[in-house]
Amino acid sequence: MPRAATTSDPFNAVAEPRRREILNFLALEERPVGDIVAALELEQPSVSKHLRVLLDVGLVNVRRDGRRMLYRTNAEAIRPLHEWTRTFERFWQNQLHRVKERAERESEPKKD
Amino acid sequence: MPRAATTSDPFNAVAEPRRREILNFLALEERPVGDIVAALELEQPSVSKHLRVLLDVGLVNVRRDGRRMLYRTNAEAIRPLHEWTRTFERFWQNQLHRVKERAERESEPKKD
DNA sequence: TTGACATATTCCCATATGGGAATGTATTAT
DNA sequence: ATAATACATTCCCATATGGGAATATGTCAA
């Protein structure tokens, strides 16, 4: 059995580098598909397919403007990912403490 | 072309739900493979394969203890994911502000 | 309508899984 | 050396991609 469908999970949707780039690009303001195509140098169908995935998991919103479709990152949907990674924050802080302490011990040679 | 190999990217490695569970389980202290098998109710080969992926991207460390292999989450490797999601923090905060402001306006009817 | 734009969808295909089953490899116990 | 224990790896297979090319759909202009 392969990995769960990308459309079922934001972690999965974000696993694709191009989709992360799209989310970055659409974070500040809504943009039409054409802008994404130009900015990321991808084929239009490719962009549309990625946007479809992002839309399905709620990572972007859309609105039609004439014949253009304006997409924008829905930051709120990224929050769960942030929360999950945050649960490890204290662990890497501990790791840094250990490294720092060792460095300080080693920089005080023959202190006795 | 399918997605890049999971072994090449922590985002990809973490896209698999079981691997996230393993990282959670190994965050506090090192554990032998058998414990993971028991805790997550997965087949041993499955667990070993997931651990292999996590090890390749640096998300866990190992050390041998007799015939057991003790794995532990390397929190530091999760940090880049945290940083990426963090770049969207101000956006969802803005969204919350907008929601809050609207709620406050609506709770002050006929104020003029 | 007809045509030009801007996007979305479909088809085809090579590749990366992830699980199950079987097998291989260390390491310790006897 | 032999068996048992604890893992890792390999093989086979069904499924989920992601890209390229072609095509379909929707909207605006003339």
Image (cartoon, coloured by chain):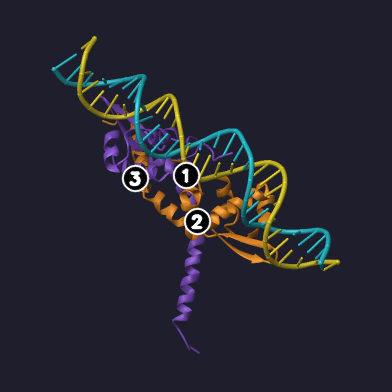
Chain colours: A purple, B orange, C yellow, D cyan
Foreground pick, B75 / A48: A48
Residue underneath mark 1 = A80
Q: Secondary structure at mark 2?
A: loop
Q: Give the letter of the chain under mark 3.
A: A
Q: Give the letter of the chain under mark 2.
A: B
**Residue type at the position of mark 3:** Asn
**In this rendering, would A68 be left or right of B83?**
left
**Residue at 60 percent of width and 51 percent of height:** B49
Q: Position of residue A72 (x, y in %)?
A: 33, 37
Name the mark on residue B6.
none
Q: Is D9 located above or below residue B91 in the figure?
A: below
Q: Is B82 located above or below residue C11 in the figure?
A: below
Foreground pick, A41 / B35: A41
Q: CA distance from mark 1 to mark 3?
A: 17 Å
- Is the residue under label 2 in contact with that under label 1 (CB below 8 Å)? no
Q: Give the letter of the chain under mark 1.
A: A
**Residue at 45 percent of width and 78 percent of height:** A104
**Residue type at the position of mark 1:** Pro
Label 2 crowding class (10 Å Cα cut-off): few <14, some 14-19, many 20+? some
**Residue type at the position of mark 2:** Val
**Residue at 48 percent of width and 71 percent of height:** A99
To the question of a shared chain for discs 1 and 2, the answer is no
Residue underneath mark 3 = A24
- Is the residue under label 3 in contact with that under label 1 (CB below 8 Å)? no
Residue B38 in view in this figure: yes
Name the mark on residue B57.
2
